């Protein structure tokens, strides 16, 4: 093991804050948090968060991945292929849409949706999957694995593997297999092997545990496409970079439509890839507030939620140090959300850093509030959102009223709700 000895995918063993490979990181050695572009540091740290906590078997691979990613970023042909696929396969740039009826309904700031649900496969996930599969091909890996919760990352990974003729194995919790049947069928149609995971609560955490175990066993030929901005370095960095196309487009589009930057950016937060993709290109714009919305489940004052920043503590899980839902003994507490994509008991380390430094704000939304926002958006805008961005939308109304009519909000509509209609119907007591 490096950086302590936690078991891969198991409980977050206590690690001393601010350590890098066992060496204390002094305040003098830390870069200024205002220089956002230089994070993570050379050790994959966002302040005291991030790093690499992986089995010795995996350490050569993550180091090779870091080096290959550095080479890819310096290779114009890599960027050209990535950009070509984003434009001609994914359908980017995604539109910036003025939600006029919702704006009138809330009676406050103008609300815009960055419509990444219109991407091929129906979510932001494909941006990152293309980048990682291109890296896997550069590294000569012949087998792709992934974890998935809501199924959107699994579908996106299976889609890119079909495009390049690569075998794909997707680990998915049994609970999520049941509540995300449309995406399970899509993955099978695309040729992916689905591995249901019955351990724990049968959700995203457990799927990631099993994917990590598979990776350790098949390290020679396998590339693990992680779906969120978490995991061991360099994953949080490269996922952020691949998803930052969202924020770069949003900046250009809102300047064109409104002639200025937004007052507030809003995005749902699970692991945090769609949010960091929107936020990162704006981090050095001090006048732009950033608000992430965590899954509050039945309420943060209950055990049934997935709000790791609002209700958790720092610890180690899945290869990185971040905020986690854990008990006093450091054992992971099962997360809950109506959304299969948000019920993860941790968050990406860069979000933990933005939270600690105060650069971003994090609020919560309950299951009921998300259901209400899901229905409201559908009826007023003719857009059926996924349950994940419905959480963000539930807080947009509050923020719009806080800002007043001169305010300007951009929210990432990170996924469409086709996958959730059966689940929502069940919660609403409706038969399809």
Image (cartoon, rainbow, N blue to C red):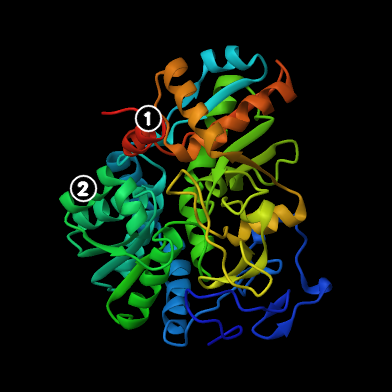
Q: Residues within 10 Å of mark 2 (few under 14, many from 20)?
A: some
Q: Residue at x 41, y 29 (%)?
A: 428
Expressed as whole percent of the image width and height from the top left, the position of residue 148 reads 37, 56
Q: Is residue 152 above or below residue 75?
A: above
Secondary structure under badge 2?
Answer: helix
Left/right placement of residue 193 relative to residue 28 reads left
Q: Residue at x 49, y 65 (%)?
A: 235
Quadrant into which the C terminus falls: top left
Residue position marked by numbered label 2 in the rendering: 185
Mark-to-mark CA distance, 1 and 2? 24 Å
Q: Is residue 193 above or below residue 130?
A: below
Left/right placement of residue 284 relative to residue 373 reads right
Left/right placement of residue 357 relative to residue 133 reads right
Q: Which mark is residue 97?
A: none
Secondary structure under badge 1?
Answer: loop
Instruction: Determine if residue 95 is in view.
Output: yes
Spot the residue most to the right.
28
- In front of the other: 89 or 320: 320
Expressed as whole percent of the image width and height from the top left, the position of residue 333 reads 57, 64
Q: Which mark is residue 429?
A: 1
Quadrant of the image occupied by residue 164: bottom left
Q: Residue at x 78, y 74 (%)?
A: 29
Instruction: Determine if residue 118 is in view.
Output: no
Q: Residue at x 38, y 41 (%)?
A: 123
């Amino acid at each position: 093991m490096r950086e302590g000895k936690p078991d891969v995918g198991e409980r977050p063993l206590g690690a001393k804050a601010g350590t890098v490979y066992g060496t204390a990181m002094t305040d003098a050695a830390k870069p200024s948090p205002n220089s956002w572009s230089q994070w993570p540091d050379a050790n994959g740290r966002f302040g005291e968060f991030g790093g690499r906590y992986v089995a010795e078997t995996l350490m050569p691979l993550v180091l090779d991945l870091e080096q290959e990613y550095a080479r890819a970023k310096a290779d114009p042909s890599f960027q050209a292929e990535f950009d070509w696929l984003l434009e001609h396969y994914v359908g980017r740039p995604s539109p910036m849409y003025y939600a006029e009826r919702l704006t009138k309904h809330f009676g406050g700031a103008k609300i815009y949706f960055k419509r990444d649900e219109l991407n091929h496969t129906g979510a932001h996930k494909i941006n990152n999957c293309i980048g990682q599969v291109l890296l896997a091909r550069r590294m000569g890996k012949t087998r792709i694995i992934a974890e998935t919760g809501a199924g959107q990352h699994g579908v996106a990974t299976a889609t890119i593997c079909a495009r390049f003729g690569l075998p794909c194995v997707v680990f998915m919790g049994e609970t999520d297999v049941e509540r995300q049947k449309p995406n399970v069928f899509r993955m099978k149609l695309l040729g992916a092997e689905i591995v249901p995971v019955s351990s724990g609560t049968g959700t995203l955490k457990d799927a990631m545990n099993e994917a990590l175990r598979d990776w350790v066993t098949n390290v020679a030929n396998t590339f693990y496409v992680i779906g969120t901005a978490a995991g061991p370095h360099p994953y949080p960095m490269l996922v952020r970079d691949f998803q930052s196309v969202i924020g770069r487009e949003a900046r250009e589009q809102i300047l064109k439509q409104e002639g200025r930057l937004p007052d507030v950016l809003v995005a749902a937060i699970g692991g945090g890839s769609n949010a960091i993709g929107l936020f990162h290109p704006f981090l050095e714009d001090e006048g732009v507030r950033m608000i992430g919305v965590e899954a509050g489940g039945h309420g943060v004052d209950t055990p049934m939620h997935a709000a790791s920043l609002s209700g958790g503590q720092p610890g180690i899980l899945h290869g990185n140090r971040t905020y986690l839902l854990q008990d006093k003994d450091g054992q992971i507490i099962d997360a809950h959300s109506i959304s299969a994509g948000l019920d993860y008991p941790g968050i990406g380390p860069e979000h933990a850093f933005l939270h600690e430094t105060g650069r971003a704000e994090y609020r919560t939304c309950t299951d009921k509030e998300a259901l209400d926002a899901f229905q409201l958006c559908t009826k007023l805008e003719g857009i059926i959102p996924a349950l994940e961005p419905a959480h963000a939308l539930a807080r947009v109304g509050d923020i719009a009223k806080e800002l007043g009519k001169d305010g300007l909000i951009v929210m990432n509509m990170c996924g469409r709700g086709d996958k959730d209609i059966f689940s929502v119907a069940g919660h609403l007591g409706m038969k399809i």
